[in-house]
Image: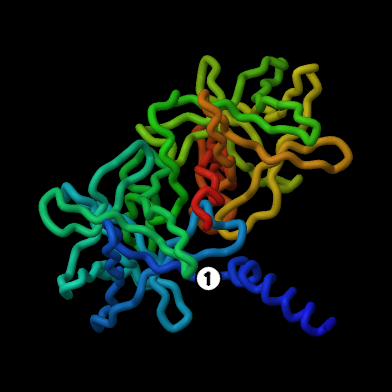
Amino acid sequence: MKQIDLFLFFLILLPFCGFSQSATWAVKAVKGGDAFPVHVYLDDATPVPVFAIYNEGNDHFMDVKGVHNGKNVSIKLVRSSDMLIPVKGISETGEILKVKAIDSKGGILDVKGVSRDGNTINVCAVKGENDYIPLMAVSPEGVKRTVKGVKFMSENVEMELSGVKVLAHLKAIPTVEVGSIDKKWGLQASTDDGQSLSVVAINKKGREYPVNAIMAGKHPYLMHVRAEGSVDIYVKFVKNDNGVMVTGIDEYGRPYDIKAKATDGTMYGVNGGEKTGNVIPVYVMGANGATYPVKAVSSKGHEFDVKGIKAKKGDVEGSIAGIDGEVNYYAHIKALAPAQAEKK
């Protein structure tokens, strides 16, 4: 009897174990009931399937790559004078590789960035003029993420990869439609006893500035996190001798403490958890070791997750040009739709 009970226990546990393992989610062009595979083509015309790379805790900002013989092929939106932005594979030696979708009749479709919303770019297979099929990452269990071009920099060149000028990263992210909504969302955390904490940036004189998530376009796909005073105060992860810290940096390069404030005026620290893949959780550090996840909350009560995001390898993700020189930061901090919203 005990053996049967143990067997049933493992049967129940198995789906959860499977979902928690590293996995690849097929990238497809999806419209209605149609789903067309997407491939990157090597120099010898070998088609390599394109996947979003999933790890538990990293499903807010998944890498999109070709996977061939255990090696990854980077896929980016590359700089071009074309009206539609080319999506290309980039080899380790800087060779530019074709990325195509294949429709149900064997037709070969270009994959392009077709329109922009704030700091994200809509990526589709192009079937004809104004006939676009959006790209999605689909898990083996049927969970979906939208594949988007993502920009962090205002310049046309986001980075260079093997000598190729990259206009935007290609990532799979959760998206949730929230309808017409205010562009500014407050940053908050809730304690176990239901107390609401508001996140603020504090300058050297002790002045406080509310920290908000701000929509860059019409949709809250990848929201900026910053405070607004006489100048913008960017909220970033910064790496120093004390580790990786949540810090405010204004347009002049001046530092700000980032704290969570209770209604009685008590201040709590804000810091990051363990990095998983591209993502770092952001927590309020409560009493007795308690941690409370930071959320962006809309005027209509929608809650988005606030996460540290790394798009580049290494300790320097970017820099802010201050009066006394550039201030480097380790990771962006953004608000994104909750990943569990699309889990089945």
**Residue sitting nearer the eye, 259 or 9:** 9
Res 87 quadrant in image? bottom left
Q: Does the rendering let one see residue 105?
A: yes
Q: In x, y percent, where is residue 106?
A: 17, 75
Identify the residue at image location x=57%, y=30%. Answer: 297
Q: How crowded is mark 1: few (under 14 residues within 10 Å), some or many (20 or more)?
A: some
Q: Is mark 1 on a helix, strand or loop?
A: strand
Q: In x, y percent, where is residue 308?
A: 59, 45
Q: Does the rendering let one see residue 226?
A: no
Position of 64 relative to 80 (above/below): below
Identify the residue at image location x=86%, y=36%. Answer: 287
| Residue ranking furthest to the right | 288
Q: In x, y percent, where is residue 142?
A: 45, 64
Position of 60 relative to 116 (above/below): below
- Report how many numbered discs are placed on residues in the image: 1
Q: In x, y percent, where is residue 99?
A: 27, 67
